[in-house]
Each structure stands twice: as structure tokens, then as C-alpha cells.
Amino acid sequence: MKKYEEDHYRFENIKDYIYPWVKGSALVDSQALNGKHISEKDTPVVSFIEDLAIIFVIKRNDDVYEVLKDNMLPPGCDIEELFYSSCENLVRDVEFTIANTWYGGFAMMADGYHETSSLCFKHIWQVCVDKLKDDLVIMAPCKDTLLFAPAGQKNVVEKMIEHGELSYEQSQDKISKTLMLFSKDRKELTVYED
């Protein structure tokens, strides 16, 4: 019996519990059941921005996630469709809120697992640039920390970078020190170039 034929992995049984997780170049996750050695050789990985990629996880219960492997997917599974349906699951199940930081920037809050997954949602960033009337500099240093600041406020951006680098160094689930820009005019997420 193939793995994807087992009830535990049958696509119709897991499809509503698959979520996208943003990862850095080190494809590891200390919280996922099988996240210690994630390899592109046996795991669906979608390239995202610069050194960021998206993997998929299956929520098994409240605080248990399992990285989705190729052998868990039925033959011919469309990864692009999987990405869109996993984003729909995330929107349905996870509430994203925005918090202020002490230095004038902002942080995305979710449930401790999906903060960086908010990068998948252009509409979140569009609302933020519309409210702030400025481009956004965004940093995803670790899985549970996503920071952003108005690009025009250089002092705030510098403090955000310090905060992000400290979070990166202290985390077991490091993502990246790469800075991203969501442009209010181009309405897209790109690598930030100061």
C-alpha cells in the first residue's frame, strides 16, 4: 500500500488541514513531527522570494503538525492548486491581527505557527499600505515573528531590523534576515533594496 492510500494520508481526509509555512534556506522546523530534516528531494517546496520558500504541513491536532511529503500526495497532485487551497484553509482557520511594537513598527500576530504565513496574502499588505500611505519594509526572522514598518520612517526600520536580527538569533525556527518591500504603487512583494 502506498503512503497516500493509507487513511491517515488519504488526500480527501487531509486536504482541509493542509497549510502553507514559509521557510528560509534552512528547511527545518523544531515543532513539526518530521521537521528536523526537510529535503526538497522528497518534499513539495514552492520557491517564494529570495531565500524564502513555502512548504506544506498537515495539522494533526491542536499543536501537532506534520510536514507534507511527496509520497503523501496522490499521483498528479497540482502543487499550485495545493498552494491556493492551503491558503484558503489558513484564511478559514487562523486569525491574523496586527500589533504595535515599542519602537513604532508593527508585528503580525497569529497562533505561534503561522505568523510568517501571512506573507502569502497580498490583501493583508495592501490594507496596511493603504492605511499607512507608505511602502512597507517587512522582515520574517522566525516562524512566530513577522515584523513590518513604513519604509519612509528610516529610524523605525532600523529598530525593526535590530528587533528582527535579535529574534533570528534567539529562535530555534529561524527563517531569514532578508528584508522585503511591499510597494503601495506596484502592489507587490519584492526584496528590499535600501
Image: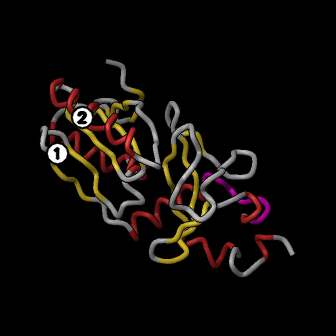
- The spot of residue 42 in percent (x, y) is 74, 51
Instruction: Tell me: residue 7, above or below residue 140.
Output: below
Q: Is residue 3 left or right of residue 151?
A: right
- The spot of residue 117 in percent (x, y) is 43, 52
**Which residue is the extreme one toward the front?**
170
Q: Is residue 161 left or right of residue 114?
A: left
Front-most of residues 120 and 160: 160
Q: Disc 1 designates what residue?
A: 101
Dot placed on the residue nearer the N-terminal end, 2 or 1? 1
Front-most of residues 120 and 123: 120
Q: Is residue 33 magenta?
A: no
| Tag 2–tag 1 contact (CB < 8 Å) | yes
Kindly report the distance in space between the C-alpha atoms of the residues bearing marks 2 and 1. 9 Å
Res 185 → quadrant: top left
Find residue 136 and name its label. Answer: none
The quarter of the rendered structure image containing the C terminus is: top left
Q: Disc 2 designates what residue?
A: 160
Instruction: Tell me: residue 120, above or below residue 190.
Output: below
Mark 2 surroundings: few (<14), some (14-19) or many (≥20) residues within 10 A = many
**Which residue is at a point 22% across and 53% down the rendered structure image?**
98
Instruction: Tell me: residue 38, above or below residue 179.
Output: below
Q: Amino acid at mark 1?
A: Thr
Q: Is residue 33 left or right of residue 93?
A: right
Report helix, strand or loop for mark 1: loop
Res 94 → quadrant: bottom left
Mark 1 surroundings: few (<14), some (14-19) or many (≥20) residues within 10 A = some
**Which residue is at a point 26% across and 31% down the rendered structure image?**
162
- The spot of residue 81 in percent (x, y) is 60, 57
Q: Amino acid at mark 2?
A: Met
Give the magenta part as a residue range.
Answer: 74-80
